């Protein structure tokens, strides 16, 4: 089955700096890669996603890049703000059949004011 | 439009007790999922359903059971609770192809 590894497990940045979180996946058949933000006591919420036929996607301060050859994808947050502090999860799935997500272990991002 | 709702929010069980975690979605999604999240870990798939009457096991199904008699509801049953089932349980739903998976707020379960 799919295995997703995520690094780093914790990340502390100064407000206004950029943050980068990296993930690798094992199943070359996976073709959908979402990123979720989880605030304390809440369920994960989708912040951005990318399909395997796209190399990069951007939404305001958030961008995701995908390298299918290396089976690697990354989340980039620019101009970080204190409200970006949360746990971020990457995930991978095959968009057929059950369409279930395999999650990374999470990155706790702390943005220092 | 409430999205995905879960009850209860918190529950403490004694070893050997049973309970049902409720999950309801009002988005008419065919796909529904149960995940568990252990401290400091990502979510792991327990069971899933691709439509009413169709369910199947995920990666960690032991000790759990599900049913899907309607599109809206996907309850998770714990039989003979064990301390290893202490976790936060999330229900999620998905409309289908390349679509966002929506999560409920979670149920925090402690088995003592």
Image (cartoon, grey):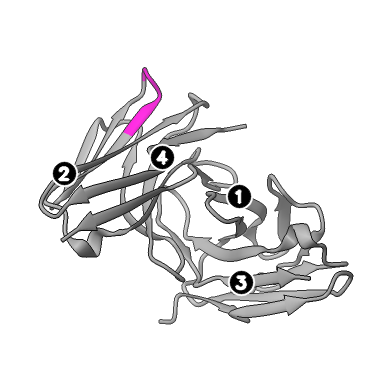
Neighbor class of circle 3 (other Cα within 10 Å; few <14, some 14-19, many 20+) is some
Alpha carbons under labels 2 and 1: distance apart: 29 Å
Q: How many marks?
A: 4
Given residues B32 and A101, the one toward you in this image is: A101
Question: Residue at position x 17%, y 44% from top?
Answer: A58
Residue A51 part of the magenta segment: no
Q: Nearer the viewer, mark 1 or mark 3?
A: 3
Q: Which residue is mark 2?
A: A18
Residues indicated by labels 2 and 4 sit on the same polypeptide chain: yes
Q: Are marks 1 and 4 in contact (CB under 8 Å)?
A: no
Q: Which residue is mark 3?
A: B108
Question: Residue at position x 50%, y 38% from top?
Answer: A94
**Image height check: is A5 above or below B97?**
above
User: Is residue B106 at least partly visible in the picture?
Assistant: yes
Q: Which residue is mark 1?
A: B44
Q: Nearer the viewer, mark 1 or mark 4?
A: 1
Identify the subunit bearing mark 4.
Answer: A
Alpha carbons under labels 1 and 4: distance apart: 17 Å
Secondary structure of residue under mark 3: strand
Neighbor class of circle 2 (other Cα within 10 Å; few <14, some 14-19, many 20+) is some
Alpha carbons under labels 2 and 4: distance apart: 25 Å
- Give the image location of residue A35, x and y in percent: 36, 48
Q: Which residue is mark 4?
A: A32
Q: Are marks 2 and 3 in contact (CB under 8 Å)?
A: no
Alpha carbons under labels 4 and 3: distance apart: 29 Å
Q: Find the magenta span and give its range.
A: A69-73
Alpha carbons under labels 1 and 3: distance apart: 15 Å
Secondary structure of residue under mark 2: loop
- Main secondary structure along the magenta-highlighted residues: loop
Neighbor class of circle 4 (other Cα within 10 Å; few <14, some 14-19, many 20+) is many
Question: Is A25 left or right of A66, judged from the image as shown?
Answer: right
């Amino acid at each position: 089955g799919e295995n997703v590894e995520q690094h780093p497990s914790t990340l502390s940045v100064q407000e206004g700096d950029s943050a980068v979180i990296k993930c690798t996946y094992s199943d070359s058949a996976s073709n959908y890669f979402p990123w979720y933000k989880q605030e304390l006591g809440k369920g994960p919420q989708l912040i951005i996603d990318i399909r395997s036929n796209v190399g990069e996607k951007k939404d305001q301060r958030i961008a995701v890049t995908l390298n299918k050859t290396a089976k690697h994808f990354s989340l980039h947050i620019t101009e970080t703000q204190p409200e970006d502090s949360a746990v971020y999860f990457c995930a991978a799935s095959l968009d057929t059949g059950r369409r279930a997500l395999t999650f990374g272990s999470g990155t706790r991002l702390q943005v220092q004011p | 439009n409430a999205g995905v709702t879960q009850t209860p929010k918190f529950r403490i069980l004694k070893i050997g007790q049973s309970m049902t975690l409720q999950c309801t979605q009002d988005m008419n999604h065919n796909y529904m999922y149960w995940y568990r999240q252990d401290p400091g870990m990502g979510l792991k798939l327990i069971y899933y359903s691709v439509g009413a009457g169709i369910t199947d096991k995920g990666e960690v199904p032991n000790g759990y059971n599900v049913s899907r008699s309607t599109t809206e509801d996907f309850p998770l049953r714990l039989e003979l609770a064990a301390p290893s089932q202490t976790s936060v349980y999330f229900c999620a739903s998905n409309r289908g192809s390349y679509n966002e998976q929506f999560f409920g707020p979670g149920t925090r379960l402690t088995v003592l």
